Image (cartoon, rainbow, N blue to C red):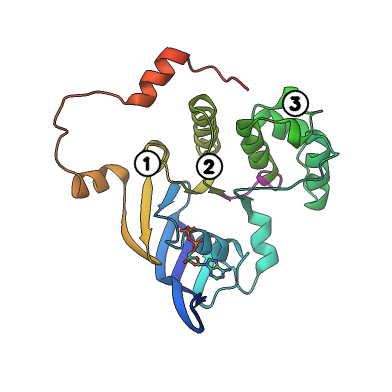
Amino acid sequence: MPIVKINNLVKRYPVPENPHTTFYAVDHISLDILDGEIFGILGPNGAGKTTTLEMIEGLTDIDEGEVTIANINVKTSPFEIKEIIGVQLQASEYFDKLSLRELLDLFCKLYQSPRQSETLLAKVNLSDKSNATPEQLSGGQKQRFSIACALVNDPKVLFLDEPTTGLDPQAKRNLWNLVKKLNASGMTIVITTHNMEEAEFLCQRIAIMDQGKIIALNSPSNLILKYAPEPPETALHGNLEDVFLHLTGNALRD
Ligand code: ADP
């Protein structure tokens, strides 16, 4: 059953060299995201992924078309939408004097959420850092903390924008496990990534975007069958990352 319905979504921006004309950053996209799935949006830089996500989240105005989440219209009911979604942005700024616990307590109050900061920190494996400030965290810990912040309102749909960019393999796999765990509890997750292995591991379905359009939409295995059917020339198993993890272990270093 679809939880996010996107119908003919359009965003136009001025052409940088000729601001009197516009181009389609998002060019009439239609798409259903199913309740309970991990859905990936892939595409080269400038494809329109972030603009699409920001329109779905109600952070950027929709020029044309319609988005509903759990049958709530994003354009006409922006406040209701914010109660049922969680958004983890690529970079976040916090009040830098507050600890993780204090920040989460503050967000819980702002959302009038009954959730406890301790529960949220435990969920993302950061209980032992509750008195640290965000600037004292490693990259992987920062990403996990920003997910904890996005979970304050117990969202139906969680949006993750390139959550593992810049993380080492241990921190990345730890974050993948967290995403799987959240999804196993029933949360729908929409993720953008440039990491193909991540998309293949996490996503039930993937949309590939280019120049504002969806150019393919299917499960990872069906996409591979359709677009990369030839077997590799040598019978290699695994990949370099598996070698790295085999040699350096799976334990988190941060
Ligand atoms: P992606 O996330 O796939 O890298 P974006 O959605 O960020 O792509 O950008 C799509 C296109 O829209 C790009 O050409 C980008 O330069 C342009 N764009 C994005 N945001 C704005 C903006 N606020 N003003 C003008 N152009 C923008």
The magenta segment: 150-159
Q: Is residue 125 visible?
A: yes
In the depicted view, which residue is nearer to us: 220 or 154? 220
In the depicted view, which residue is nearer to us: 13 or 74? 13
Q: Which residue is mark 1?
A: 196
- Which badge, 3 or 1, comes first in the chain's sequence? 3
Indicate the amino acid at tag 2.
Answer: Gly
Q: Residue at x 48, y 27 (%)?
A: 169
Q: Which residue is mark 2?
A: 186
Locate residue 198: give its quadrant: top left
Locate residue 118: give its quadrant: top right
Query: Disc 1 vs disc 2: Cβ atoms closer than 8 Å?
Result: no
Q: Residue 84 lies in magenta, yes or no?
A: no
Query: Disc 2 vs disc 3: Cβ atoms closer than 8 Å?
Result: no
| Circle 3: element type | helix
Q: Is residue 175 left or right of residue 145?
A: left
Quadrant (top left/top right/bottom left/bottom right) for the N terminus: bottom left
Q: Is residue 1 visible?
A: no
- Which badge, 1 or 2, comes first in the chain's sequence? 2
Q: Is residue 19 left or right of residue 245?
A: right
| Circle 1: element type | helix
Q: Residues within 10 Å of mark 2 (few under 14, many from 20)?
A: few
Q: Is residue 140 above or below residue 187?
A: above
Q: Is residue 95 above or below residue 251?
A: below
Q: Which residue is mark 3?
A: 129
In the depicted view, which residue is nearer to us: 78 or 194? 194
Indicate the amino acid at tag 1.
Answer: Met
Q: Residue at x 45, y 61 (%)?
A: 46
